[in-house]
Image (cartoon, helix red, strand yellow):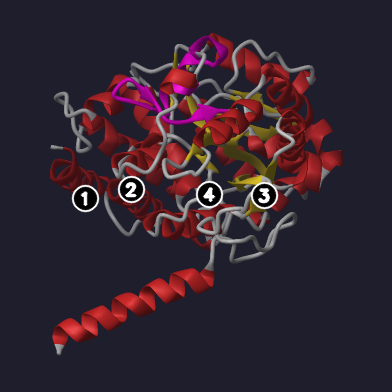
Amino acid sequence: MLKKLISLFSVLALLLLAACGLNGGGSANQTATDSKEEKPSSGEKKELEFWYIDSGEKEKVYLEAVERFKEKHPDVEVKTLQIPNDAYKQKFSVAMSGDQAPDVFHSWGGGWLKNFVDQGKVLDLTGETDTAHFNELALKNSTYDGKIYGLPLSLSIDVVFYNKEIFEKYNLTPPKTYEEWLTIIDTLNKNNVIPIALANQTKWPGAYYLMNFASRIAGPELFESALNRGGKGFDDPAYVQAGKYIQEMVDRNAFNSGFNGVPYDEGQGRQLLYSGQAAMMDMTISFLNNVRQEAPEFEEKLDFFLFPTVPGGKGDTTHVGAATGPVWSVAKNSEHPDLATELVKELTSTETAQNYTDRTGSLTGVKDIEPADEFTKRFYEVVQNATHLQMPYDQTLPPELAELHKDTTQAIFGKDMTPEEAAKKMEEKAKELLE
């Protein structure tokens, strides 16, 4: 009887997956496509499926690259699907688990992509990749055991944005040290200005603080040692001290009220800056693109500084938080792997990269693409002067450890957990997963 029930549930599960199809959910371009299992009959076009998360000008750049690819391959149709960030991660994981992934897909490299690489579900692009075409550090984030599984279009960095008008009003200058930052925070609080906007419901915005503080305290070698089990762990005193700095900032009222319950994607945190209620935000340079879409008049007030140094710290401002994404990858079970690889190449071509940089205020993982935009040029100079680019922990660590990192960091911000407790939990899980 049990065997019959198991068999019945298996059939139902397969039917449900088939019913859901590959393209459930909304898209500005494609709301439904045929199953990839239905091969085109003789004379019909070959078909590729392409999933990505960005909308707006970034999406336009991608779709223009798709059109250039189609001009070169008139016998190929490309079905595109745009899915917002959080929904994408869930939908893509379901598709991967059912061997129904799109031919070409968005990733962030790091541990997120490696999880699927380890399952044997991502195509090895090593032999098709001109490594000289890419920023070495960006490409490294999708390279595992010497093999390349994704090509990076985007390279982002993490900076602290601030409102120049507010700083000028209270005679403030961008801080170079943590002590100077605390003084600014105190001054803004005295004048009823929220010092730093933080939207930490999704946890990753707050995680930048832990990563930045840890790097400033112990240098970038700390994370590499903890990840690779090289002597130092996630319970290192530097991680505990990083948590203490976070809680000191919380105690100094550095952030908006209820920050752990504020979602980032909806833009509530950004609105605090646009309206002048808050003076700063630690965020990736995608913030500039948000400004240009949501509040273009605010750009004339916008400036940034690098995360400050800490007393006695080994790290400095040439150690920069960074991220890749989109990184374009190909599903290993693609029916047309050669064509899918050609599409990825077009999505990371010099033309695509230049358009991406010039039109979205973003940096690119393609080498020697200098922005024409004056604001973006300053981000470019930061990267050029960087001696280390630290990819986000949650995109580098194995998924289970990455989630714990975000959970414990959010708990540190909420003072639901001490820095010592958070560090201990991280190290215990790291020993379980990494050793």
Q: Are marks 4 and 1 in contact (CB under 8 Å)?
A: no
Q: Is residue 142 left or right of residue 172?
A: left
Q: Secondary structure at mark 3?
A: strand
Q: Quadrant of the N terminus?
A: bottom left
Label whose residue precedes the other's in the sequence (2 or 1):
2
Check disc 4 and give the amino acid type.
Pro
| Front disc: 2 or 1 | 2
Quarter occupied by the C terminus = top left
Q: Earlier in the sequence, mark 2 or mark 4?
A: 4
In the rendered structure, which segment of residues is drawn in magenta?
131-152
Q: Which disc is residue 102 wearing? A: 4
Which residue is under mark 1? Answer: 421
Residue 186: % across, % down: 56, 40
Mark 1 → mark 3, Cα distance in angstroms: 45 Å
Instruction: Give the residue furthest to the right.
Output: 297
Q: Amino acid at mark 2?
A: Pro
Q: Amino acid at mark 3?
A: Thr
Comparing 29 with 388, the one in front is 29
- Secondary structure under the numbered disc 4 in the rendered image: loop
Q: Which residue in the protein does label 2 denote?
A: 399
57 relative to 85 in the view: left or right: right
Res. 80 mark: 3
Question: What's the distance in space between the residues labelled 4 and 1, CA to CA?
Answer: 41 Å
Q: Nearer the viewer, mark 2 or mark 3?
A: 3
Residue 244 seen in the current view: no
Can residue 245 be found in the magenta stretch?
no
Which is nearer the N-term, disc 2 or disc 3? 3
Q: Amino acid at mark 1?
A: Glu
Q: Earlier in the sequence, mark 4 or mark 1?
A: 4
| Residue at horizontal 79 percent and vertical 17 percent from the top | 372
Q: Residues within 10 Å of mark 1 (few under 14, many from 20)?
A: some
Give the side of residue 194 with respect to residue 18, left or right. Answer: right
